[in-house]
Amino acid sequence: VRVGILISGRGSNMMALVEQAQGYEVALVASDRPDAAGLAWARERGIATFALSPKGIGKAGYEAEIDAALRAAGVQVIALAGYMRLLSDAFVARWRERIVNIHPSLLPRYKGLDTHSRAIAAGDATAGCSVHVVTEELDGGAVLGQAEVSILPGDTADTLAARVLVAEHALYPRILAEYVSR
Ligand code: GRF
């Protein structure tokens, strides 16, 4: 199964998906930010990349280009990995049940941003990450898998994020492998 990964920055989850690929191959890494650090990493490994900023072309034009690049690469499933842009309803509908995302919380808790500081502020004993199907509702699609980590005394959003990120890198490749073989 050919997977396309959308990133906006660092790309550590994308790297984990590439390095632990099982039952899928990463056919394209695309970014809305041409300077995303992860793009250079993918390029160095001979993975096809595509970068386009939406600035000046509008959301619809931008998404049409991304869609064309994914289709040209033969992509069948899209994995969002730190992709910081909301996909339009039309794009989601075109790829229905074929887009997954990793979110740094135990969904349905803490959809959206600042998940770690919200978990700490709430006094939660655990935090974690979720891989879910992408629907029109932000962070709202069916949860495919989760990993839990403890919140420790003295944790800050940064120390907790680092602990959750380790869990993300193990969870995402495993759940994507399951998903593409469904
Ligand atoms: C991860 O914590 C992911 O769960 C969230 O954004 C972060 C992306 O990090 N959606 P990276 O770009 O994969 O390193």
Image (tube, rainbow, N blue to C red):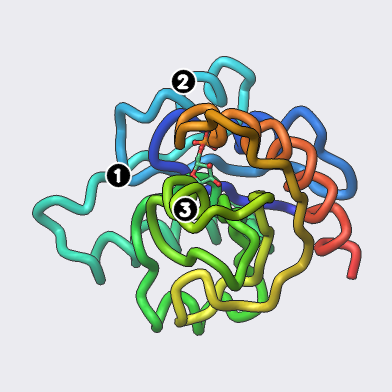
- Residue at the image position 54 percent from the left and 35 percent from the top: 161
Viewer-side residue, 135 vs 42: 135
Furthest residue to the left?
A: 56
Give the Cα distance between marks 2 and 1: 14 Å
Give the number of the disc on residue 52: 1
Give the number of the disc on residue 40: 2
Amino acid residing under circle 2: Ala
Mark 2 vs mark 3: in front:
3
- Residue at the image position 60 percent from the left and 73 percent from the top: 108
Dividing the image into 4 quarters, which one contains the N terminus? bottom right
The answer to which quarter of the image holds residue 75 is bottom right
**Looking at the picture, does residue 46 appear above or below residue 31?**
above
Of mark 2 and mark 3, the one earlier in the sequence is 2
**Looking at the picture, does residue 143 appear above or below residue 23?**
below
Of mark 1 and mark 3, the one earlier in the sequence is 1
For label 1, the crowd category at 10 Å Cα-Cα, with few meaning under 14, some 14 to 19 and many 20 or more, is some
Does label 1 point to a residue whose CB lies under 8 Å from ligand 1? no
Amino acid residing under circle 3: Thr
Tag 2, which secondary structure?
Answer: helix
